[in-house]
Amino acid sequence: MSIAAELLPAVVLERTFVDVSMLLLSTELPAALKEALLPSLLAAIVGLLVFSTLYASKIVAGRRHVEELQRALRDKEKAVLALEASEERFRTLCDHAPVGIFVDDGRGNGVYHNSKCGEITGLSVEGGLGNGWHTAIHPDDRERVVNRVLEAVSKGEAYQDCNRYVHSDGTVRWVEGIAVPVKAADGELVAYVGTLLDVTAQRKAAEAQQASESRYLAIVNEQSDLIVRWQTNGTLLFANQAWCDFQGCSLDEALGIDFLSVVPDQRREELRQWASTVTAEQPVVSGESTFVMADGRRHFQLWTEHGIFDEQGRLIEIQSVGRDITAEREAEDQFREQQSLLAHVSRLSTMGELVAGIAHEVNQPLYSIKNCAQALQNVLADENQSNRELMVQCADQISDASSRAGEMIRRMRSFVRHGETEREVCDLNLLVEEAVRLVEFEGRRHQATVVVRPTNECVLVRVDRVQIQQVLVNLLKNAFESIAAAGCEIREVEACCSVAGSVGKISIVDSGPGVPEEFIETIFDAFVTTRKEGMGMGLAISRTIVEGHYGRIRVEQPQGSGAAFLVELPLHDPAQSFASIDVTSAVDPVSDVTVNAVNVVAQEA
C-alpha cells in the first residue's frame, strides 16, 4: 500500500475535525445543533490522536512528499515559462536579425525561416518549408546547390555556398548561405541551423572592381611607357607589357625577380639611396638611365619613381614609370647639328658682309711688312752693313705686323669655323672685347664709336665661345647700321657687362632711332626685319643660341632715343671644381656648371 493510501484515513479525520470545528465556532448555528455535533468532534479528536500515535512518522513523510511534489510542479511551471520566454526572445531576435536565419530537419527540409530569409529569397513562411526553398534558387544553380546540401547532410558536415536566387519581384540576387549541423548528445544529427546573407551589392562591386582592374591593366599594357611595381628589397610585383618586351621576357618570368638587378649601376645606387631616405611628404624622384643593348645600341630612358606608404608612413612599394627618350635625344642632337649649321651659315654671311673691312684691316699689317722687308733688303744690300740697329727695328716691325695679321686671321677663322659645340668657361668681358675687335672696322666705316664698359671682376659663364660672339657681332652690326641709316649726329654704341644675382648680363645700347613699336613683340621671330635688304634671320638665330644656353634675349626702349638689347646668361657656379682659368684667354675645360643668363643690348634696325 502506498503512503498516500495509508494516510487517507488520517486526512479524512483531519478534514472532518477541521470542518466540525469551524461549524462549532460559527455563531450562525443553533445551540441545539452545536450540541448534536459535539460528539462527532470528540470522536474526530480521539481518532486523530489514535491515528497520529500509530502513523506519526508516515504522516511527516507524506507531508514532505507532498511538498516535494508541489515544489517540482512549481519548478516545472517556471521552466515552461522560461522556455516560452526564451522561444519568444529567439523569435524576436531572429525576426530582427540583419541576416536570414533558417532551420531544417537534418535531411534538407526546411522547418523554419525568419522574415529576413523571406525578404532575401522572396519566399513566404509556408513557401520555405520542406523542399519549397528549391524553387527560389536560380535554375542555372539549382541542381548544384541542392546536391551540395544533400552531400553535406549525408556526411553531417557544415556547408557554405554562394549562388543566385530569383526573387518573387523578378530580380536576381546573389546570396551566401552557411549552415552547421546540430547533434544530440549521442551524436545523432537532429537539425541544421544556418544563415543567408544578400551579397548582391558586394558581388556587383567586386565585379565592377574586377572590370575596372581589367580595364586598368588593358590601358597599362597598351602604354608605350615602361611601368613596374617593386618592393623595397627589389622584388618585382608587376610589370606591363612594354617593360616585358623591352627586357625580352614574359610577365610570369619577370615577377619575383630583383628589379634593381636590371637597372644600370649608377641608377641602381641612386635608387637604393633614395629608397632609404624617401618620405611620404616627398614621395617622387626622377632620373635618367642609359641602357646598352646586346647589339651595342644605346637607349636613353627617363624614369619617375613614386613611393607608396602604409598608414604608419612606412615605404612598402615603389611604382616606377620609364619613358624611352632615345628618339628625342637623337632628334635633339640632330636639331643641335642643324642649329649649329644654320649659325655657321649666318656667320659666313656676316663675314661676307664684313669682307671689305677685313681686307682693309689685313692689308695694313701686310703693307707694313712689305715696307719693312724692303728696308731690310736695302740695309742688307749695303756693303758696309753698318746699320745693324735699323735691321733689328725692321725685323721687330715685321714680327709685330705679322702677329697682328695672324691675330686677325685667327679671329676670323674662329668666327666662321664649323664644328662640334664646345662649351667652356669664359669671361663675358673678354667675349665682348673680342666681338668689338671683329667689327671695329665696320664701326669706323659707319663713323660710330664703340664704348666698352667691363666689370671690375671676371664674369664667368660656361658657353660656346663662338656662338655667343656671333650673337654679339650681330647685335653690334645691327646697331651700326641702324645709326647710319637714320643719319644720327651722335653715333655711339655702348657694350656693357654687369652681374645681377646668378645672372651675367650684356647690354648693347645704341643712339639710333630705336625699334618701331609694332616690331617690339616680334623682332626676334624669323623673317621679321626693319630693313628692306634684311632677311630677318639674325635676331631669330641669336635668340635660338641664347635660349640654347638657358639664357634670355630681349629688347627695351630706353628713355630718349636708341634701342637696348639685353642678353642674360647663367653664371658659372664657382662651387663646382674646375682647373684655374687663364683670364687672358678665358678658356678652360670644366665639369658641368649651373646655367644662368646674360643681358645683351643691341638693335636690329
Image (spheres, rainbow, N blue to C red):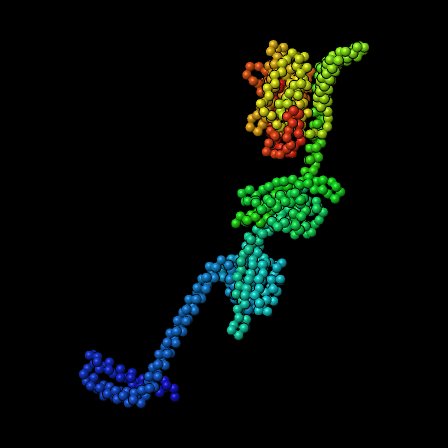
Of 256 and 192, nearer the camera is 256
Which residue is situated farthest in the left direction here? 31
308 shown above or below 550: below
Q: Residue at x 56, y 26 (%)?
A: 500
Of 293 and 61, nearer the camera is 293
Q: Residue at x 38, y 75 (%)?
A: 73
Image quarter of the C terminus: top right
Q: Quadrant of residue 579?
A: top right
Please state if 521 lies on the left or on the right of 249 as rendered: left
Of 468 and 180, nearer the camera is 468
Q: Residue at x 74, y 12 (%)?
A: 390
502 shown above or below 67: above
Of 246 and 545, nearer the camera is 545
Q: Quadrant of residue 221?
A: top right
Q: Quadrant of residue 23?
A: bottom left
Q: Position of residue 277 (x, y in %)?
A: 57, 45
Residue 260 seen by the camera: yes
